[in-house]
Amino acid sequence: MAGPTRWSRVILAGAITGAIMVAFGTRGGGGEESPPARASVVPKRLDIPSLGIKAPLMKLGVTDGRVDLPPYEKPDTAGWVKDSVVPGDEGPAVILGHVDTKTAPAVFYKLKDIREGQAIKVVRSDGKVAQYRVDSVEQISKSRFPADKVYLEDGLRLITCGGEFDRDDREYRDNFIVYATLVKG
Amino acid sequence: MPSVKHVAVLGAIAIFGMAGCTAEANTGSPSGTPTAAPPDTGVSREDIEVQLQPARARAGQKVWVLANCPIPQGGPEHRGTASSRIFRTPVTLEPILATPTPAASGTATPIPRPWVRGQATVADGTATGIYEVNARCEGTNDTGKASLRIVDDTQPSASPTAKPSSKPTRTIISTEAPHTGGGGTAAGGPDDGSMPIGMPGVLLGVALAGGIGVVIARRRRS
């Protein structure tokens, strides 16, 4: 009869859907699963002991001149801008994270409490741990985003949002940026 | 009695509304650290604010010029020009478009901010010193200026120990400010239009409703 075949089709369809969901679900978060285009080493985890932040890192590309963002569905994941250097290497390394989602605090909610001199560690896929020390922090209007300072000068930058939330633009008016110097690569 | 209830409900709504307003008034960020003072913009009170990023550069380097041009009424476009005798050419300053967060698409039309900006290149062979950069807004003819310090281009880079071979090529990956927040923890919240109450408002409302209830109950008894 038609019954068994129909059921097996339904089960097959379900299995395929599940497989696709698993495939897509793991791709964004892991970083090292997808074959890296430029370098083989990627940062895997961000660790800020003074704030109790331990965040997995994903890779962020650039779309239409704008750096991609970690999805709100993964509020505890921060993102490494993959066109910046791997933390621990010489040069500018940039990590973004949300301060909150539309409903709840996210990975960099406590970032504004960071202080000069505190340590930031980044665990890499090659087993090295890059260690940085916070030099300065800056809260600056998004209309004056210091792109040159962020993307051209040496060191790690952690970026999130801050200041007032503009309900018309549905975004925070400021960026909060942490500048840190490499202590040990 | 129904009319009493009516009044009570209306009163509660009014209070809810007021509570919402109070919550809104508190949204100003008290923790907001003041950002660094902008570079000296000059003399006349009519001057607009002009910023340079970076404010010190070497010959041959690129510098962003930002000018706080007012948005002209009606016809003329919101843009400006920046010039300096050490720029290779004058540059056009275009509006900075701010698009809402990607998640909030749908309503998204870019909103121009009053700042316009453009990138200029310092001419090769420019001697060290401080030079004036002038900006002019088209349409409104506002002007402003800022000072650009040119430093010695033979001086070693910030990290002399760095091996040149290990240096990656550096580019400004994006000039856009990342929209790293949904507003869920901001006072008022992201959807304030539909949810103007907030936790303090809810608590106040509940307390008030309770109080009204007690009053009504007492009246009924007496």
Image (cartoon, coloured by chain):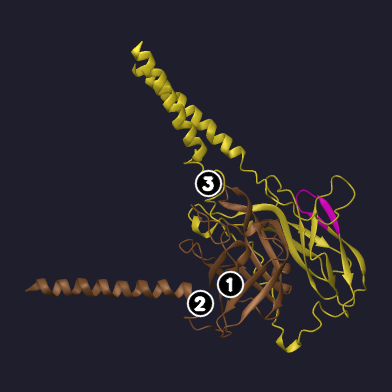
Range of residues picked out in magenta? B135-146
Residue B42 in the image: state x and y as whole percent: 88, 52
Residue at 76 percent across and 59 percent down: it is: B66
User: Image quadrant of residue A90?
Assistant: bottom right
Residue at 61 percent across and 76 percent down: it is: A83
From the rendered image, report the letter of the chain displayed in yellow. Answer: B
Task: Tell me the element at label 3.
Answer: loop
Task: Tell me the element at label 2.
Answer: loop
User: Image quadrant of residue B85?
Assistant: bottom right
Residue A65 seen in render:
no
Q: Are marks 3 and 2 on the same chain?
A: no
In this view of the protein, which residue sits in the foreground, B199 or B65? Answer: B199
Horizontally, is A16 left or right of A74 in the view? left
Q: Are marks 3 and 1 on the same chain?
A: no
Q: Name the residue under label 2.
A: A31
**Which shade is chain A?**
brown
Chain on which label 2 sits: A
Residue at 71 percent across and 73 percent down: it is: A155
| Residue kind at label 1, given as amino acid type | Trp
Is B143 within the magenta?
A: yes
